[in-house]
Amino acid sequence: MEKKNILVVDDEPDVTALVAYHLKAKGFHVETLNDATASIAKARSYQPALIILDIMMPHMDGFQLAEEIRDIDPDVPLFFLSAKTMKDDI
């Protein structure tokens, strides 16, 4: 089985480390970034099969980042991480 690249973007290093640990244990190649703006260039060069994004990040939130990523690769799946629990947020 070909190993798939996954990009994890969250401003909390502990979160990216935890997610990466579990994904790597399942055999995925994982890159992590704690800066939303830096992840745009990484999405171009790394060509991930999946991107996991935090919603609440400084400088650029996950929704804004998703729009930027869609300009690079409109087909890459995006998963959102969130601590938001309000019904309207969900």
Image (cartoon, grey):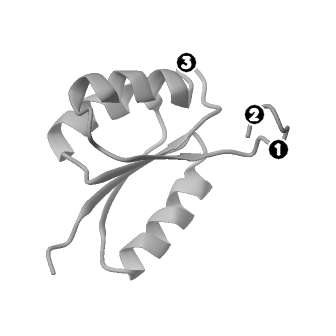
Q: Is residue 12 left or right of residue 42?
A: right
Mark 1 and mark 2: Cα distance apart in space? 7 Å
Q: Residue at x 60, y 56 (%)?
A: 15
Q: Position of residue 1 (x, y in %)?
A: 15, 81
Name the residue located 57 percent from the left edge and 25 percent from the top edge: 61
Q: CA distance from mark 2 to mark 3?
A: 20 Å
**Residue 34: where, in percent of width, then height?**
49, 40
**Residue 84, quarter of the rendered image:** top right
Q: Give amino acid for label 2.
A: Asp
* Residue under pointer 2: 89
Mark 3 to mark 1 CA distance (whole Å)? 22 Å
Is there CB contact under 8 Å for labels 1 and 2?
Answer: yes
Disc number placed over residue 75 in the picture, else none? none
Q: Residue at the far right: name it.
A: 86
Residue with the mark numbered 3:
59
| Mark 1 residue type | Thr
List the residue tagged with mark 1.
85
Q: Amino acid at mark 3?
A: His
Helix, strand or loop at mark 1: loop
Please tell me which residue lies in front, 66 or 42.
66
* Crowding at mark 1 (Cα within 10 Å: few <14, some 14-19, many 20+): few
Q: Mark 2 or mark 3, which has the lower sequence index? A: 3
x then y, percent, for residue 38 = 35, 29
Q: Secondary structure at mark 2?
A: loop
Seen in the picture, residue 50 relative to 19 is either above or below; the reply is above
